Image: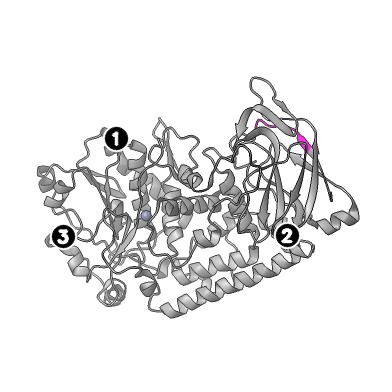
Amino acid sequence: MLNSEILSFSVHQPTNRSSGHDAFASEDKIVPTMTVNQFRFATVVIGGILVLLFVGCGTKNQPTAGPDVLPDVAAAADEAPSANISDQSSSANAAASNFNSSQNSVNSGGDNTNAAADESPSSHTDPRQPSPSNSPELQQPSLTARRRLPDDRPDNNAARLLAAGIKRYESERLILLTDVSDEEVSKLPALADRLFEKLTEHFGDLPQAFDGSGFQVTGHLISDEARFRSAGLMPQKGFTFKHGRHLNYQFWIFDSEFDYYRRHLLFHEFIHCFMTCESGMQNIPSLWYIEGMAEYFGTHRLHTNGRIEFGILPEQFDGYEGWGRISELRRTFERRPAANSTAAQQLAIPTLNEVMPDTVNNFQQDSQYATSWALCWMLNSHPKYMQLSAALTPMKTRRKFVRAVAGFRDSDQPRFNVDWLLTIESLLENFDLERSFAVHSDSVFSSVDLAASGPQPISLRADRGWQDTGLRLVAGDSVKLVCTGRYSVDDQPTAWISEPQGVSIRYVRGLPLGQVVATLVRTDGSSLTNRIPVGREAILTASENVAVWLQVNDTSDSRSNNLGTADILISVP
Ligand SMILES: [Zn+2]
């Protein structure tokens, strides 16, 4: 079943902190003791002058609070909001400028040495290590200099909860209050402990809390909202959500009919609590990262023996009911080509600029969760981008985060854009990480080069996804591709031998499996076409400045059973 859940998102703005606690049986709250300095800091962070924000993943009702409040409070005391916004603009301009010069060099037929240098072996030596930064602005305070927010959870009376029909399950990292009777629910706190270990492994140890408390979250898993409301466990009016929402060390989620998605929602909100426990949602990294990482680590595989893995790519649809992130992504751009049309059409895949804005403060559409998940998955799965993911983990404040991302993008345009588009074009459950990411070419040539040098041979591997021919065309250029060779596109029950026209008993994207197909990717990485049939021979004409990419038509989850190459001869017609 496809995911039909609408995960809208909103930010609400209660008038002050104390009113936010009125609904939480504040008479039962334990007031933490603090030193004077701690109290001053906490006052700045969570006190009256800064507006308290709540984050929710989905709203039942559209927000009634003022829109887009996050940028105004995004900067903490040391980072003025106006500076934050203008820095972001200048970063974007710098990126655009850098990108334009890359594009020009490619269009003029120059070699793509910048892109080649990015693929130097040294950059792959240990992709999980953060890139060293000499910029003092990007240095983070040491762990001992940082503090978590104090534990502000109400001390709920267990007997009163039980009388209200609400059970309590507890582990080291999660207290779960729920009226869901499913036996599976009792296992959730222990799974949250495993998630905490995984998050610590990725983001590093959490700092001490002001009040010395250990990190523990209270989650409310709700079947009957009225039951929780009458027990005083629901947030105050205006704190609305469709699926789930968090606030400091608490979260609330509505039960799902699917076991998988119930866990997923719980993990998603738990991750928000983990990632914002130093800031209370003040001055945090960009929303695409906050939501994308919650989606990334919340996507999990639970084995029958109880072992659990986080940050995985589902290997199939079954077992991940309610998730549907890939289906949602594909729905936005996948169109079956008209039977009588081979014309290239631009696919409506959102660009990186659209997927990773720094100024979006609430998610209103499923597709925003899907694209943010996909980007964070790519950052943590693609060997080249793991270094960016690792470098971002200590960036706890928005300004540092935005600068780190902009710096990486400046250094890597437009390859990052192109990798994003080609990955999303191919993304499926069980995407083959070893074989299906795009393969770039460091040897770039133009139609002018081609006219001078004569036909160029290219070898196209059947067991790889999109492969860069190195050919760059400017608008109006035409090239001829002649394809020969025999290769295998499946090995069951025996080798399926294909030639460049493909095998006509199975189709992928409306074209025969095994057919040589092309996509034309704008050289700035801003868009790409659908799969264009090449077969034994075709003439491609560019209507804009593009790079020519090819593949043996297949799905990204089925490359390991392919073998051999197609031989392509590229010439000026
Ligand atoms: Zn969320």
Per the image, label 3 sits on a secondary structure element best described as helix
User: Which residue is at 54% across, 44% downward?
Assistant: 334
Q: Are marks 3 and 2 in contact (CB under 8 Å)?
A: no
- In the rendered image, residue 51, in percent from the top left (x then y), is placed at 28, 72
The picture places residue 109, in percent across and down from the top left corner, at: 79, 62
Of circles 2 and 1, the one toward us is 2
Q: Main secondary structure of the magenta part?
A: loop
Whole-percent x, y for residue 552 in the image: 69, 38
Question: Which residue range is magenta in the image?
Answer: 560-566
**Which type of secondary structure does the marked residue at label 1 adopt?**
helix
Q: Amino acid at mark 2?
A: Ala
Q: Please name whichever residue, 277 or 338, is drawn nearer the observer in this view of the structure.
A: 338
Q: Which residue is mark 2?
A: 475
- Of the two numbered discs 2 and 1 on the same chain, state the one appearing first in sequence: 1
Q: Is residue 182 above or below residue 198?
A: above
- In this rendering, does residue 363 appear at all? yes
Instruction: Specify the quadrant of the image occupied by residue 34.
Output: bottom left
Q: Amino acid at mark 1?
A: Glu
Extreme residue in the top direction: 493
564 within the magenta span: yes
State how far apart marks 1 and 3 are (Cα). Answer: 29 Å
**x, y percentage for residue 314?**
48, 39
Please, which residue is most extreme toward the front here?
340
Which residue carries the number 1 mark? Answer: 184
Q: CA distance from mark 2 to mark 1?
A: 59 Å
* Residue 290 vertical position relative to residue 342 in the rendered view, above or below: below
The count of marks equals 3
Kindly identify the amino acid type of the residue bearing the numbered disc 3: Ala
Q: Quadrant of the N terminus?
A: top left
Q: Residue tagged by mark 3? A: 23
Marks 3 and 2, the one that precedes in the sequence:
3
Discs 3/2, front:
2
